[in-house]
Image: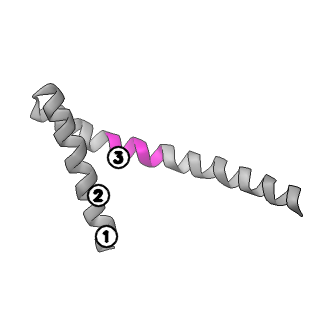
Amino acid sequence: MAKTFTFAILHFSVAFTITYLLTGSVVIGGAIALIEPAVNTVVFYFHDKVWKQIESRQAQLIA
């Protein structure tokens, strides 16, 4: 759990820093740093579902 927590902090920090450097805005940097990981989590869920379907089809072809 500690590894996951530290990665979340790292992800937030990177997103905030890059956005802040590009925009100069603490507010926009903070918003992007909060929104981007949330959107990424949803996208990953659907990516994982599609990937499992692909693996299932490949397993059926081999069997």
Badge 3 is on which residue?
Answer: 37
Q: Is residue 39 magenta?
A: yes
In this picture, residue 8 sits left or right of residue 51: left
Whole-Å distance between the Cαs marked 3 and 2? 9 Å
Badge 2 is on which residue?
Answer: 8
Upstream in sequence: badge 3 or badge 1: 1
Dot 2: within a 10 Å radius of its alpha carbon, few (fewer than 14), some, or many (20 or more) residues? few
Name the image quarter holding residue 6: bottom left
Whole-Å distance between the Cαs marked 2 and 1? 9 Å
Q: Is residue 23 magenta?
A: no
Badge 1 is on which residue?
Answer: 3
Is 55 placed above or below 36 here?
A: below
Residue 29, given in percent of the width and then of the height, sits at: 18, 36
* Label 1: element kind: helix
Residue lying at 79% horizontally and 54% vertically, measured from the top left: 58
Q: Which mark is residue 34?
A: none
Report the coloring of the rendering.
one colour
Extent of the magenta region: 36-42
Majority secondary structure of the magenta segment? helix
Residue lying at 37% horizontally and 45% vertically, measured from the top left: 38
* Label 3: element kind: helix
Name the image quarter holding residue 5: bottom left
Amino acid at the residue labelled 2: Ala
Q: Front-most of 44 and 21?
A: 21
Quarter occupied by the N terminus: bottom left
Quarter occupied by the C terminus: bottom right
Upstream in sequence: badge 2 or badge 1: 1
Whole-Å distance between the Cαs marked 3 and 1? 16 Å
